[in-house]
Amino acid sequence: MTENGSKLETPTNISLVTSTDLVMRSIEYKTVSVFLVLVICGIGIIGNIMVVLVVLTTRHMRTPTNCYLVSLAVADLMVLVAAGLPNVSDSLSGTWIYGHAGCLGITYFQYLGINVSSCSITAFTVERYIAICHPMRAQTVCTVSRAKRIIAGVWVVTSVYCMLWFFLVDIQVNKDQNVECGYKVSRDLYLPIYLIDFAIFYVTPLLVAIVLYGLISRILFLNPIPNRADTSTTLHKADKSCKDKSCSDPDSAKTVTRSRSKGAPSSRKQVTKMLAVVVILFALLWMPYRTLVLVNSFVKKPYLNAWFLLFCRMCIYANSAINPVVYNLMSQKFRSAFRKLCKCQEEDTQRRAMYMTPTNYSMVRDTTAGSPESNGKKDEKKQEKPGKGVTFQKEQAAAKKDEDELYFSVV
């Protein structure tokens, strides 16, 4: 039993407590731990599900960048469910309740979500660099179909890589006769694995992001001339929306002209800032855990303070939960899509009532028909109050749809 304890002296599993420290078994620690995990994971699970639904159900949101954000959201969901929720049961019961298969599966999905999230961040960073710094090449490279193939490749390769954890973990019985999900290999064997993980899934994405966002900033924020490819696309959409509305109003024409000059560059800057914030949060929130693992891999007596370990885990959970909040705060498209997703049922009810009202009105008027004179009076009323007819209602709905298309094409 002493040998097993020495094997588990460096906690590297982000969801499981592998130390028998009295602090971790105290009521205060368990209360704080369970409360923070439930709040953070609850917010993160709801937010990431909304990201996936918004992109999958909204046509104008299906862009290459948003495809990578969906991959990131699914990976974050996997981390929150596989790492956060087992932490709650482990804190409350004080023992591992999921058995041998649960130990293998939960650990596998933890690291699969962690590694896919870092790969997704690297993927959308490269996509943004190509789209902004090489706009002509982006027309053929940065497509939704190519993004889907890249995402599928990332998940397949990472899934195969993470199968290594099936041979590294197992359930153990500690000195207090409690079952734990821990590591069954010696410290010398898992040291190279964590160093490789640290280099591939933390250091490399950050180095790539620093270099590419530096190049993007030079083009996007220092060069006042917008890229032709993005500008021509925005102009084409604005012209199409203007043509559908006939642009008879001078104010509407000015609005379209203004959107031509400012729409594309402001939209690109907005998206780039949002993605840069996601990368910065990834670097900051993962730094405590990565640093702890790196330091404990080389020192003889690992640092195992219970409250600091809790802080490291909360930072990881917060990183997986905070991205939808960033999208809502920094992206007008995501904010509008989130609102529409929350109000979809209410809008359906209102739309149903709108189309039912004119129909009932016409039926009441038809019952009064009986003579040519009454028909003539009805025609005069229709000409005097066109707002009561079905045609006018349809024109209003079509005008609103055109305004929405123009808004989403330039914002």
Image: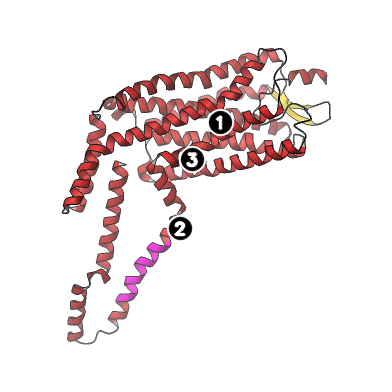
Q: Is residue 284 magenta?
A: no
Answer with left or right where residue 287 lies relative to residue 67: right
Q: Is residue 352 magenta?
A: yes
Q: Is residue 148 visible?
A: no
Q: Is residue 6 above or below residue 111?
A: above
Does the residue at mark 2 contact the one at mark 3 (Cβ under 8 Å)?
Answer: no
Q: Earlier in the sequence, mark 3 or mark 1?
A: 1
Magenta span of residues = 349-362
Left or right position of 348 against 246: right
Helix or strand or loop: what does disc 2 sit on? helix
Q: Residue 359 appears at what percent x and percent y?
A: 33, 72
Q: Nearer the viewer, residue 73 or 101?
A: 73
| Distance from Cα at disc 3 to Cα at disc 1 | 19 Å
Residue 306 vs residue 149, the one in the foreground:
306
| Amino acid beneath label 3 | Val
- Amino acid type of the residue tagged 2 in the rendering: Gln
For marks 2 and 1, the one nearer the N-term is 1
**For the residues marked 2 and 3, what is the alpha-carbon distance in whole angstroms?**
23 Å
Q: Main secondary structure of the magenta part?
A: helix
The image position of residue 346, as x and y in percent, is 44, 59
Q: Residue at x 61, y 38 (%)?
A: 81
Looking at the rendering, which quadrant does residue 139 occupy? top left
Residue that mark 2 sits on: 345
- Check the image and report above or below for 369 versus 9: below
In whole angstroms, how far apart are the C-alphas of marks 2 and 1? Answer: 32 Å
Residue 113 disc label: 1
Residue at image location 66% in from the left, 12% down from the top: 298
Q: Which residue is mark 3?
A: 325
